[in-house]
Amino acid sequence: MDIVDQVSLLPWISIKNLQIGNVIFWKYKSDLVHDQEIKNYLDEYVNCYVDEHLQPVKELTIVSFKDKNNFKQLTNEQYQEVNSARNILCFLCISEQSRIALNMNNYSVGPPSADIFDMKYQNFVAGSDGIAIRSGSAISGGWTLKEVNFQKPWSTGGFFRNINIDVLLAINKLINSQKNKRFKNRLFRSLEWFRLAHIENDSVSPFFKIIMLASAFEIILDIPNISDKSIYFAESVEKKLTEARFKKRTRKYGKKKDNKTLSNPAWWCWKFYKLRNSIVHGDNIKFTELIYSNWITQSIVADIVFYNYVVESLVDLKALEPIKKPDFTNIYNLFKWI
């Protein structure tokens, strides 16, 4: 019986060398592959990936578990680790690039979409030139490598540009620690929703993206099943992001219309969750309600609040030194929160 190997890759981005937990992201180079038959197959296989103009993708990223020359099929547990690492990479890129764009108040340097982190898994038999393709539940087989192309989608958006190395190192420190397992699980599950909320193809509406971002918050905040999740959301973020420089506002709140004082970021969280509820309950919502100000959408604000919440959590867990935190001052000025 032929031995079936497997390769995992991110075909639309090029990462020279980066590791998250046990998962290695590396730019494909033929001379790094030791087994000659596997090398021959992969040299042909990577040429199946073409850009928007049908030209072969010059550089793509292989995703390996522990060893660059590990082409064994992933177990379910290993798949979960690889998927979580991909979600972390997506989060680090989109969040940091959003922070940079907002610091410059320039939408043209915004992040790529999550489509650029679409990960492919391909089973193959070294020494052959055959390929079978699964799309959803459908499998199409009987093809050769020279007969198949996979085209880069137009929805990938901008380039993979920046991640914050200090935040990456902190997440790796958290992953490698035996402590804080509950928070780690919540972080990993929330980042799956974060990635899905940034898919830009036409199958996902802007309204559903709000729901997915709200789900990411619900998971990482560990919001209990209570009647008023919006105020729990707001108060949880206020506790984590408490800063004296934040402006505070007092509003009439609840059925009794009591006075409630919260910071501007907390009130934004409250309003964001109310928007989520309106979408879920089928209320009539105008697209203008998805805009925070000018080119800044509610989703972009959510990205920044979520990013800052993760950063402050890493500080609280002693994984990140306070002096190495990303700076959000210009952004909060732009939001008129300070």
Image (cartoon, rainbow, N blue to C red):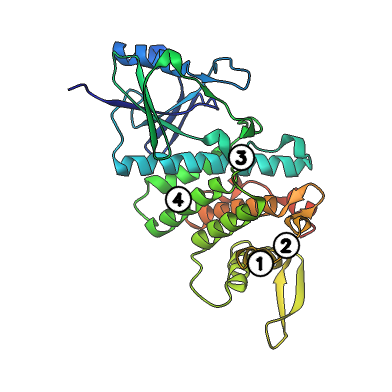
Q: What element carries label 1?
A: helix
Q: State the residue position of label 3.
A: 201
Residue 176 lies, in percent from the top left, at: 37, 45
Q: Is residue 285 above or below residue 116?
A: below
Residue 302 lies, in percent from the top left, at: 65, 54
- Is residue 197 rendered to the left or right of residue 79? right
Q: State the residue position of label 2.
A: 285
Q: Nearer the viewer, residue 95 or 208?
A: 208
- Label count reads 4
Q: In which quarter of the image is residue 239?
A: bottom right
Task: Tell me what residue is drawn at x 52 percent, y 51 percent.
Answer: 193
Q: Residues within 10 Å of mark 4 (few under 14, many from 20)?
A: many
Asked if labels 1 and 4 touch by Cβ distance under 8 angstroms, the answer is: no
Q: State the residue position of label 1.
A: 278
Q: Earlier in the sequence, mark 3 or mark 4?
A: 4
Q: In which quarter of the image is residue 232?
A: bottom right
Q: Earlier in the sequence, mark 4 or mark 1?
A: 4
Task: Tell me what residue is drawn at x 65 percent, y 39 percent.
Answer: 97
Q: Earlier in the sequence, mark 2 or mark 3?
A: 3
Asked if labels 1 and 2 touch by Cβ distance under 8 angstroms, the answer is: yes
Residue 188 circle label: 4
Separation of residues labelled 3 and 1 (CA atoms)? 24 Å
Q: Quadrant of residue 210?
A: bottom right
The N terminus is located in which quarter?
A: top left
Type of amino acid under label 2: Ile
Q: Earlier in the sequence, mark 2 or mark 1?
A: 1
Q: Nearer the viewer, residue 231 or 45?
A: 45
Asked if labels 1 and 3 touch by Cβ distance under 8 angstroms, the answer is: no
